[in-house]
Image (tube, rainbow, N blue to C red):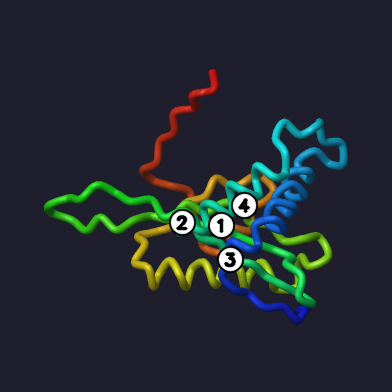
Amino acid sequence: MTSDFIVRPARPADARTLAELRWAFKREDYEGHPPAPVRHLEEAECWIRDRLSSGHWLAWVAAAGGEICGHVFLCPVERMPEPYADNDPIGYVTNFFVTPSQRNKGAGSALLDALRQHARSAGLEGLIVWPSERSSPLYQRYGFQPPEELLELPLDA
């Protein structure tokens, strides 16, 4: 089942909508009973606008009927130069979300296709993501695999 939508790079002018969708995305983690936010929506809006304006972060949006209904964000991560190997940057993927009304209609796949196309054309070595339990099967269907070399040191203890 597909819907008429377009996928395009996000623009700084999209920041308010992207912040609103970020809040909706995170509310889903609480299954309808979220606590009071500790940050204002305007803080996210400014953060997104600043990152998109600087080009340090990239994002793609899916729009249906002229309204943004999904997004995915990418932060290219530079790596230290090496004398004996290529050290292409890697891409950190985050904040992948499609509104419930547009799920399973192709918007998510189109967003991941745009992300992969950009990553290849930008010469990224690979993409990494910390998926939720719910999103892990989606990423795996799309070709993401568990890491062989990554270690993580949680600092919240």
Q: Amino acid at mark 1?
A: Phe
Quarter of the C terminus within the rendering: top right
Q: Within 10 Å of the Cα at label 1, are there few (<14), some (14-19), or many (20+) other Cα atoms?
A: many
Disc 4: CA contacts within 10 A as few (<14), some (14-19) or many (>=20): some
> What residue is pinned by disc 4?
95
Do labels 4 and 1 touch, CB within 8 Å?
yes
The residue labelled by disc 1 is 73
In the picture of the structure, the residue carrying the numbered disc 3 is: 11
Upstream in the sequence, badge 3 or badge 1? 3
Give the amino acid type for the residue marked by disc 4 in the picture: Asn
Q: Earlier in the sequence, mark 2 or mark 3?
A: 3
Check contact, mark 1 vs mark 2: CB within 8 A.
no
Q: Earlier in the sequence, mark 4 or mark 2?
A: 2
Foreground label between 4 and 3: 3
Residue at the farthest top position: 157
**Residue occupying the point 73% across, 49% down:** 25
Q: Which of the pair 78/82 is nearer the observer?
A: 78
Looking at the rendered structure, which numbered label has been put on residue 54?
2
- Amino acid identity at mark 2: Ser
Which mark, residue 142?
none
